[in-house]
Image (cartoon, grey):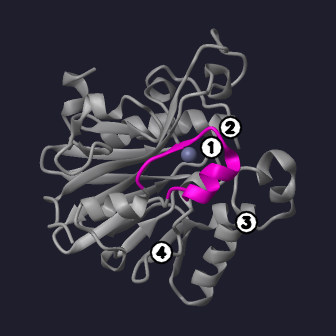
Amino acid sequence: MNTRAEDGVYALRYATRDASVRGEHFYGHPEGCMDAWPIHYYMWAILRGKTVIVVDAGFTREEAARRGQRNYGKSPIDLLGSLGVEPHEVSHLILTHLHYDHTGFVGDFPAAKVHVQQAELDFWRSPMAKRGAYSHLVNSADLQQITRLEKDGRLSVVDGDFDLAQSVTVHLVGGHTAGTQVVRVATTEGPIVLASDASHFYENYENDKPYGVVHELSLMYTAFDKLHTLAEPDGTIVPGHDPSVPNRHIPMPELDEAITQLHPTANEENK
Ligand SMILES: [Zn+2]
């Protein structure tokens, strides 16, 4: 067992996909749509004293093999281990939404309360979720696992914004999916806003360009506005899938090459 890393907010990169083009990732017909556009897969950990909050649950090595093209590194569970966190020590798991790359280890935190938006849960339980362009975005076994958690009384189904714990607040934005939520961590130096897939890349919120997978386009734009409001004036917005997150923050190779500590002011300095 590793000793616990210092209190902070960490991005853990568990997979990458390099054989990916720009046209997959931006709404409409973006310029340079056949240009290479790698995507990285993260989950996040917030360490606050004894409280460990995990944001999203990644996907498994098996899911990576099934979908192909993805390079799988250390699993989210192993990366948490590198932070000195055992799965049973996680007190809260926030699911920003229920796409397959955010739910893979949802059943692997035995003591965690799991937080999801009602609108998100309702959509994935509706007949529409069975249609092709939607169904391939989720893992049905993960959704069944979420139903088991609900039966066990471990699922916190919320409707709108809520105050979680330890200066961590959660905000419903929608747009990418019916109930996408983002996480704001207040620190003494400014807020860290974990956008997850409300902004996959820096280019989404910085240049007001929606992502290619859209539930409701207008809400994707208002989600960008909300991210700016939550972060300003002295905070940082951390996108969900951008390979350059480590360049704008603090890589922690002493823990693992896939771990980056997020910092409210590192963003502007390293742009
Ligand atoms: Zn995602």
| 24 or 61: nearer the viewer | 61
Separation of residues labelled 2 and 1 (CA atoms)? 6 Å
Sequence-first disc among 3 and 2 = 3
Residue under label 4: 108
* Residue type at tag 2: Val
Q: Regarding mark 4 in the picture, which secondary structure is present there?
A: loop
Q: Regarding mark 3 in the picture, which secondary structure is present there?
A: helix
Magenta stretch bounds = 58-74
Residue at the farthest top position: 31
Residue under label 3: 140
Q: Residue at x 61, y 21 (%)?
A: 22
Above or below for 200 versus 164: above
Sequence-first disc among 3 and 4 = 4
* Residue type at tag 1: His
> Mark 3 packing: few (<14 Cα in 10 Å), some, or many (20+)?
few
Question: Is residue 64 visible from the viewing direction of this image?
Answer: yes
Above or below for 268 versus 52: above
Labels 3 & 2 near each other (Cβ < 8 A): no
Q: Residue at x 16, y 60 (%)?
A: 5
Task: Give the percent coordinates (x, y) of residue 134.
Answer: 78, 50
Residue under label 1: 176
Quadrant of the rendered image containing residue 121 = bottom right
Labels 2 & 1 near each other (Cβ < 8 A): yes
